[in-house]
């Protein structure tokens, strides 16, 4: 594995440049060019730092991917039996009456029954929601029957639309903040 610490020359350059940049005053025509040059150096350092850590992270990520693949394969082997037992137990619990299970006593007296305690277990219930009529859900929120939290905005979709439509994007209740980033070449 590569050394996780950044090269000394890079850390020294980063410290020196940061000290200089913190002393910058509002820009004028001369300092504007200096600011662009400094920004270019920062962006080069960012790429060097990312490259440095990529060399460290890649083998770890490859090992992680292999472990996750092995885990998934092993869990996939567990699922069929686990799922079958879950179905059988649920079916049994649905059919079982509230009376305890009774078995004859070992002395052969069929009139004397011994109550067999159930095997210790616990039951968890998981609920999965599926939207079957989105318009009805929206209407219920609008009427106040359902809290607004039931409708979660699809931020990736809205962002994609805003990018595609650029300055023409308009949607009720949605505001687009535009941030400009300077990238040097």
Image (cartoon, rainbow, N blue to C red):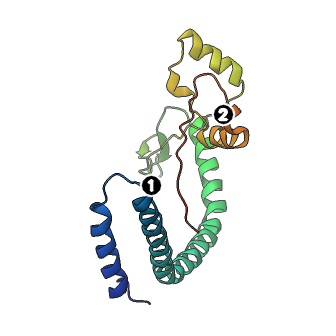
- Measured along the vertical axis of the image, is residue 71 above or below residue 157? below
Q: In terms of image quadrants, where is residue 45?
A: bottom left
Quadrant of the rendering where the N terminus is positioned: bottom left
In the rendered image, the vertical position of residue 22 relative to residue 149, given as above or below: below
Q: Are marks 2 and 1 in contact (CB under 8 Å)?
A: no
Label 2 SS = loop
Residue 58 percent location from the top left of the image: 54, 80
Per the rendering, the mark at residue 130 is 2
- Say left or right for 153 vs 132: left
- In the figure, is residue 72 to the left or right of 125? right
**Quick one: label 2 or label 1, which is nearer the N terminus?**
1
Residue at 47% from the left image edge and 44% from the top image edge: 123
Name the spot of residue 99 as percent of width and height, x first.
Answer: 48, 33
**Number of other residues with Cα within 10 Å of mark 2, as a class: few under 14, some 14 to 19, many 20 or more:** few
Q: Residue furthest top?
A: 143
At 56% from the left and 40% from the top, the residue drawn is 93
Q: Is residue 39 left or right of residue 20?
A: right
């Amino acid at each position: 594995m590569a050394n996780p610490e950044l090269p000394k020359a890079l850390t020294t350059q980063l410290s020196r440049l940061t000290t200089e940049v913190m002393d910058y005053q509002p820009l004028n025509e001369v300092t504007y060019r200096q600011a662009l040059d400094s920004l270019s150096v920062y962006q080069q350092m960012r790429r060097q730092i990312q490259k440095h850590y990529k060399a460290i992270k890649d083998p770890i990520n490859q090992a992680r991917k292999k472990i996750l693949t092995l885990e998934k394969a092993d869990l996939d082997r567990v699922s069929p039996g686990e799922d079958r037992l879950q179905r059988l137990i649920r079916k049994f619990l649905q059919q079982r009456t509230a009376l305890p299970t009774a078995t004859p006593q070992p002395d052969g007296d069929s009139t004397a029954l011994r109550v067999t305690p159930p095997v210790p277990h616990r039951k968890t219930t998981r609920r999965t929601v599926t939207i079957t009529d989105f318009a009805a859900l929206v209407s219920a929120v609008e009427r106040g029957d359902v809290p607004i939290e039931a409708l979660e905005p699809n931020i990736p979709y809205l962002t994609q639309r805003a990018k595609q439509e650029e300055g023409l994007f308009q949607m009720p209740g949605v505001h687009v903040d535009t941030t400009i980033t300077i990238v040097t070449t």
